[in-house]
Image: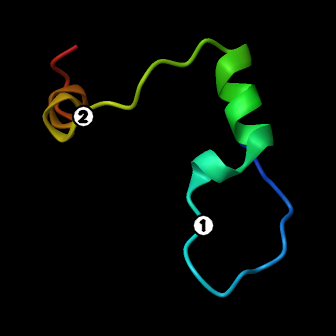
Amino acid sequence: IAFAVEAPLSGGFAPASSLAALDAYLDAVSAGQPLSAEEEAEVLVGGR
C-alpha cells in the first residue's frame, strides 16, 4: 500500500502521528500498534 501526504516542509522532523490523514487511514484499516524491534526481527526472518 502506498500512502502519500502533501505537507509543507517544516525544516525538521515531523512525526507521522501529527498527520491526521495518516491516523485516519490507519484507524480505517484497523491497523494495530507498531511491532517492537524484537517482533519485527522475528517477522523478517519468517517466524510468523
Instruction: Relative to 27, say whether 8 is above or below.
Output: below
Type of amino acid under label 1? Ala
> Which label is found at residue 14?
1
Q: Is residue 20 left or right of residue 41?
A: right
Judged from the image, the secondary structure of the residue bearing numbered disc 2 is helix
Instruction: Relative to 3, say whether 25 is above or below.
Output: above
Instruction: Kindly check if marks 1 and 2 are in contact, taking CB atoms under 8 A apart as contact.
Output: no
| Residue at the image position 61 percent from the left and 12 percent from the top | 30
Q: How is the image coloured?
A: rainbow
Instruction: Relative to 47, say whether 4 is above or below.
Output: below
Q: How many marks?
A: 2
Of residue 2 and residue 17, the one placed in the foreground of this image is: 17
| Residue at the image position 67 percent from the left and 19 percent from the top | 27
Q: Position of residue 28 (x, y in %)?
A: 73, 16
| Residue at the image position 81 percent from the left and 55 percent from the top | 5
State the quadrant of the N terminus: top right
* Residue of label 2: 40
Q: Position of residue 26 (x, y in %)?
A: 65, 26
The quarter of the picture where residue 31 lies is top right
User: What whole-number distance in Å separates the C-alpha atoms at marks 1 and 2?
Assistant: 23 Å
Type of amino acid under label 2? Glu
* Residue 35 makes an appearance in the image: yes
Judged from the image, the secondary structure of the residue bearing numbered disc 1 is loop
| Residue at the image position 74 percent from the left and 28 percent from the top | 25
Q: Residues within 10 Å of mark 2 (few under 14, many from 20)?
A: few
Of residue 15 and residue 46, the one placed in the foreground of this image is: 15
Q: Is residue 18 left or right of residue 34?
A: right
Q: Position of residue 20 (x, y in %)?
A: 76, 41
State the quadrant of the C terminus: top left
Label 1 or label 2, whichever comes before in sequence order = 1
